[in-house]
Image (tube, coloured by chain):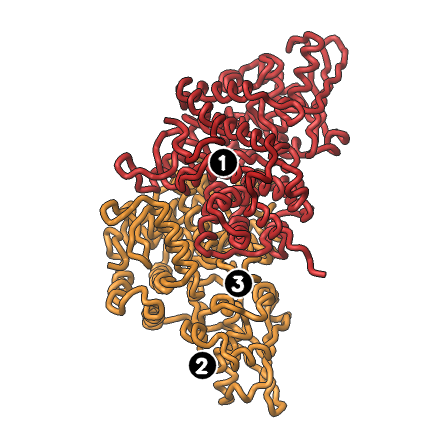
Chain colours: A orange, B red
């Protein structure tokens, strides 16, 4: 009996996926995620690291107004090659901390899938339907690779950067109509470029946007190379000298094919409500719930103990005194302080208040404690639990089973549109009219025979 | 007492390196390695994976004869941006298996340093001296990073691909005149993109050329980003969630600064004489020595037992029945068979004979046995030892302490020129006149005020 070739099964699924295989509600959710991603991409305009990456991408192509490229750089309205557009747009959509996240894989799919897929779709003149199906392929592959690589991987590696190369390769490979053998080669090329380390966060460095740029661009390259006959390892994920061997100690190969064709992981993806690292959201919502239920003011609170999973401690633990807006989005204390004062930790709240004296004071009274129930349920479920110690001596407990944005507590289309409009307004990356038109175009993308520019 | 910040020391060294710091013989050796690299780069012309990577690089820039780029793609005589030229040229120089290797770090420096450095030098109009000093910076950094990451890293990861990003970043960063702080940021961006897994070799896949392309291009990008203010982790190599944490179990931080300024690791780099994986060279030379000393023909030999280090078994072990020319360069048996029959395992010999019946028959009578003396000396010394079992029952022992090409048994300038000419003739990537002119230009590069095209 031969060993099942799991990455080949996954590659075959990604190659052969058709619109008819996908339930309508999953296609609808893909449209939701696409609109949500556009908001995050536009939100990147003006952010220093994003502007630097974008200028690099533009300077490395030979394109201009008189020599246009085929793919759109969203924050600049310039055009370039798909490789360079993917690089720029993936950086753009991962700075505001508003892009989607899949809980079980601890992976941000949109920010690596859509930049690569959109750039390719615009270049080859794919239809809206092609783009949606390709995106599904990207999500289904990337999420499973993230789950496969497991918790040990996430301790050191940024799963969005590592699994992201596979996700981008699958989406682009689908658009390029790679057959199963070619798709497996694309996986082989992508996986051997998988990279992204958490070390950057201790120093508030810019690498997060580089990770997504790298994943989207190298994933796209892997698919294009495979289309031209470039070969890759056949077991890059599960092989003796592959990703699991090099970068995980608890890899679970069965995850690679878990529920293929029946379990649509894309529909398990969460929207980000607060503009911070998702590890902060469960506790933030639990605190909000307690404060609203008991009509509390921040000054009523002596301290807050958040009861969290180990992943939150790993990622957020090093961030005790954030010095930048972006770094503060990885500070549990800052997020809860903003939520306590403004009922929302959005882009404006971070930008204007993250370092206010009263926010810092509240921040320093927030702790994280490993909680067996929360940790046991993680990463499939991200339970929020807090103990709120009041000045008067009372102790209140807050709990949410699904933070806002999780599939069971999702955003409506009106809320998705509203969020995207707010993001564009925040950065000035598009006028309200431009954004409204672009969003409407995307809500109707299924009918478009050929993808054009998103922002005209 | 604070912990020394070793990667910062290394970055400072790379940033501040000046021509006056470098002994003349090290500069001369840099010129040797540059000429040798040119031969390998030209040798890539016509190789399928190299042509595919090159076409991808060309298609992702908007350049043309009427809209030229600033950096040269050597095998096509086209021009593009430095990012895309580095991608293409680094793929080109790592397919013939004739590019240099540093024994102690098991790292191929030229194929990642020169593509990135040359592309940048041509773009910014650097001098020949600038290019040489930058190359030294690249070698000194990359080799130390390879030694730092150690043997456990090499079991799964292709050190040329991983350490290569740092090497390229250091060389380009030096050309861009990054100050020490910026150089450290460049390291942070490079290290968080380090990638490259050995899994590809089991399947004779094309990834080796992708690894070098990826390393050179992402290393270059990291330096350019740092020049524009993009920040990276400050301890990407040695930090709790950095390269060593993620990809090694025997990392030695002291290697990062070992002998900086007095030990010139560039001068420890070996030229490849045979056109195969360097792990085969010690045994190949030992067999040659025995056969010449005893005037043996292949038919005199019943079997050959090579006495090797673990690294040889790790890399070459999976290659038992090579199906492509490139894969056969990782077959100990094939290499020894060619050496036995032709006294040399060069490009022609591989290309024309790797799958001949008599070569395969000899190949299958070659084994590898772990030898404590050889393994103990590795990787600082690559000792060759063989036991040759003759048909008549005699057993002969062969030994070389330094295979041809090692620093103690190096190639003269005439031999380097001759090798580069042969490589160009093999691929047809340059006419003898073109190659002779290019080589002569490189032997005199120290005097050039501005780097131009290499192949006119």
Residue receiving disc 1: B129
The verdict on a common chain for dots 2 and 1 is no
Residue in view at x 44 percent, y 32 percent? B448
Q: Position of residue B4 (x, y in %)?
A: 67, 55
Q: Quadrant of the N terminus of chain A?
A: top right
The answer for which chain carries disc 1 is: B
Q: CA distance from mark 1 to mark 3?
A: 36 Å
Q: Quadrant of the C terminus of chain A?
A: bottom left
Pointer 1 local density, CA inside 10 Å: few below 14, some 14–19, many at least 20: some
Which one is nearer the viewer's eye here, B316 or B419? B419
Q: Is residue B151 left or right of residue A359?
A: right
Look at the image and tell me whether residue A32 can be seen: no
Which one is nearer the viewer's eye here, A292 or A77? A77
Q: Is residue B324 left or right of residue B69?
A: right
The answer for which chain carries disc 2 is: A
Look at the image and tell me whether residue A151 can be seen: yes
Residue receiving disc 3: A204
Q: Find out whether the residues at labels 1 and 3 contact each other: C-beta distance under 8 Å.
A: no
The answer for which chain carries disc 3 is: A
Residue in view at x 47 percent, y 39 percent? B117
As displayed, is residue B444 above or below residue A341? above
Of marks 2 and 3, the one in the foreground? 3
Q: Position of residue B260 (x, y in %)?
A: 65, 43
Q: CA distance from mark 2 to mark 1?
A: 59 Å
Helix, strand or loop at label 3? It is loop
First along the sequence among labels 2 and 3: 3
Residue receiving disc 2: A342
Residue in view at x 36 percent, y 62 percent? A45
Which one is nearer the viewer's eye here, B321 or A318? A318
């Amino acid at each position: 009996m031969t060993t099942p070739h799991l990455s080949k099964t996954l590659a075959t699924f990604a190659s052969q996926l058709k619109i008819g295989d996908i339930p309508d509600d999953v296609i609808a959710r893909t449209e939701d995620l696409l609109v949500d991603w556009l908001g995050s991409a536009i939100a990147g305009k003006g952010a220093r690291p994003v502007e630097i990456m974008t200028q690099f991408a533009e300077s490395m192509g030979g394109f201009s107004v008189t020599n246009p490229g085929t793919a759109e750089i969203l924050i600049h309205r310039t055009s370039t090659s798909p490789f360079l557009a993917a690089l720029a747009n993936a950086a753009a959509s991962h700075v505001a901390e508003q892009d989607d996240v899949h809980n079980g894989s601890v992976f941000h799919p949109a920010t690596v899938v859509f930049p690569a897929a959109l750039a390719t779709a615009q270049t080859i003149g794919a239809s809206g339907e092609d783009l949606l199906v390709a995106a599904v392929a990207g999500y289904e592959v990337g999420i499973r690779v993230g789950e496969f690589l497991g918790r040990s991987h996430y301790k050191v590696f940024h799963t969005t950067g590592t699994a992201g190369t596979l996700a981008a390769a699958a989406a682009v490979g689908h658009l390029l109509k790679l057959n199963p053998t070619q798709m497996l080669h694309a996986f082989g090329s992508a996986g051997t470029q998988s990279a992204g380390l958490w070390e950057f966060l201790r120093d508030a460095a810019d690498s997060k946007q580089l990770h997504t740029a790298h994943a989207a661009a190298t994933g796209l390259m892997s698919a294009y190379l495979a289309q031209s006959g470039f070969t890759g390892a056949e077991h890059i994920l599960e092989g003796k000298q592959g990703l699991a061997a090099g970068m995980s100690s608890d890899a679970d190969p069965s995850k690679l094919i878990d529920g293929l064709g029946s379990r649509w992981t894309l529909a398990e993806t969460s929207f980000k409500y607060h503009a911070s690292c998702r590890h902060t959201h469960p506790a933030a919502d639990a605190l909000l719930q307690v404060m609203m239920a008991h009509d509390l003011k921040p000054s009523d609170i002596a301290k807050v103990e958040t009861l969290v999973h180990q992943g939150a401690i790993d990622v957020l633990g090093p961030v005790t005194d954030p010095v930048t807006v972006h770094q503060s989005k990885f500070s549990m204390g800052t997020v809860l302080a903003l939520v306590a004062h403004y009922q929302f930790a959005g882009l404006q709240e971070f930008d204007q208040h993250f370092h206010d004296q009263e926010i810092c004071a509240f921040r320093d009274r927030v702790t994280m404690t490993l909680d067996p129930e929360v940790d046991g349920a993680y990463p499939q479920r991200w339970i929020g639990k807090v103990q709120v110690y009041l000045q008067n001596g009372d102790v209140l407990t807050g709990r949410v089973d699904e933070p806002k944005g999780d599939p069971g507590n999702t955003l409506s289309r009106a809320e998705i549109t509203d969020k995207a409009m707010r993001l564009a307004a925040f950065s000035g990356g598009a006028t309200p009219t431009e954004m409204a038109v672009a969003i409407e175009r995307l809500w109707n993308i299924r009918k478009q025979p050929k993808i054009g520019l998103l922002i005209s």
